[in-house]
């Protein structure tokens, strides 16, 4: 979305584009490691423009994190909502994560996990946002599990506990991916996770 400051001159850059560009800087360098010159170079914007739009460095991080989580949750929601087998939909969503948790993407890791480990223990805003993302992810998987239980392809049981286990496995995959785990190892983890639903 292109935003305008009123009164005064309209902003000459797209806030979403700036947040996306900053996302890459934070993703590669972390919050503390991302300097103002890094963010200026990464976004192509001046210090004054960034601070006017986002308030400060943390405001820019929060905008970037919100974009990252919205994109990831949407991709997961679309896979889990596909028609047909709920079990197959869950497997497809997990296989997507297996790809993101191996190779170059795996070594880069997950921005949410990175920010949670760097900041959540001392920053309530980051703690709230990352916890909300994990809760939403759990609800998406719980919904798919309930659908599979209704069709008889997933065993009866506490769908929230099953979904929480899946979320924990996903985050474990993202962390292991940073150490260079292979896609075959990630796929094997997916298959073991799917057995929970038998």
Image (cartoon, rainbow, N blue to C red):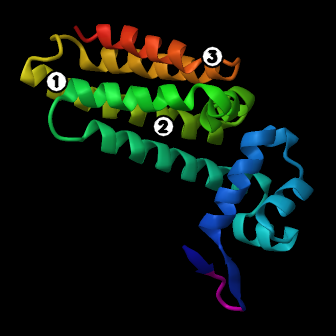
User: Is 46 on the left-hand or right-hand side of 151?
Assistant: right
**Real-space Cα separation, disc 3 to disc 2, in angstroms:** 27 Å
Q: Residues within 10 Å of mark 3 (few under 14, many from 20)?
A: some
Label 3 vs 2, first from the N-terminus: 2
- The answer to whether the residues at label 1 and label 3 have Cβ atoms under 8 Å apart is no
Q: Quadrant of the C terminus?
A: top left
Magenta segment's dominant SS is loop
**Real-space Cα separation, disc 1 to disc 3, in angstroms:** 30 Å
Q: Which mark is residue 148?
A: 1
Q: Residue 128 placed where, x, y %?
A: 56, 37
Residue range of the region highlighted in magenta in the rendering: 4-8
Q: To which quarter of the image does residue 26 belong?
A: top right
Label 1 vs 2, first from the N-terminus: 2
Q: Considering only vertical position in the picture, is 143 above or below 190?
A: below
Circle 2 SS class? helix
Q: Which mark is residue 181?
A: 3
Circle 3 SS class? loop
Depth check, front residue: 135 or 26: 26
Q: Residues within 10 Å of mark 1 (few under 14, many from 20)?
A: many
Residue beneath disc 2: 132
Q: Residue 135 placed where, x, y %?
A: 42, 32
Seen at 86% across and 61% down, the residue is: 41
Seen at 69% across and 82% down, the residue is: 11
User: Is 22 on the left-hand or right-hand side of 130?
Assistant: right
Q: To which quarter of the image does residue 190 belong?
A: top left
Q: Residue 112 placed where, x, y %?
A: 61, 36
**Real-space Cα separation, disc 1 to disc 2, in angstroms:** 24 Å
Q: Which mark is residue 122?
A: none
């Amino acid at each position: 979305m292109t935003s305008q400051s009123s009164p005064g001159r309209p902003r000459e850059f797209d806030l979403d584009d700036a947040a996306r560009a900053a996302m890459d800087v934070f993703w590669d360098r972390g919050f503390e490691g991302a300097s103002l010159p890094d963010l200026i170079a990464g976004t192509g914007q001046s210090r004054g423009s960034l601070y006017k739009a986002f308030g400060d460095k943390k405001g820019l991080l929060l905008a970037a994190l919100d974009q990252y989580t919205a994109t990831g949750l949407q991709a997961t929601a679309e896979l889990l909502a596909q028609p047909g087998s709920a079990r197959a939909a869950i497997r497809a969503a997990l296989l997507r994560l297996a790809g993101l948790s191996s190779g170059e993407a795996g070594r880069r890791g997950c921005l949410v996990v990175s920010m949670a480990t760097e900041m959540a223990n001392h920053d309530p805003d980051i703690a709230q946002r990352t916890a909300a993302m994990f809760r939403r992810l759990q609800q998406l998987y719980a919904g798919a599990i309930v659908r599979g239980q209704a069709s008889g392809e997933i065993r009866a049981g506490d769908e929230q506990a099953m979904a929480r286990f899946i979320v924990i496995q996903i985050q474990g995959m993202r962390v292991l991916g940073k150490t260079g785990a292979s896609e075959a190892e990630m796929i094997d983890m997916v298959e073991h996770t799917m057995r929970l639903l038998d």
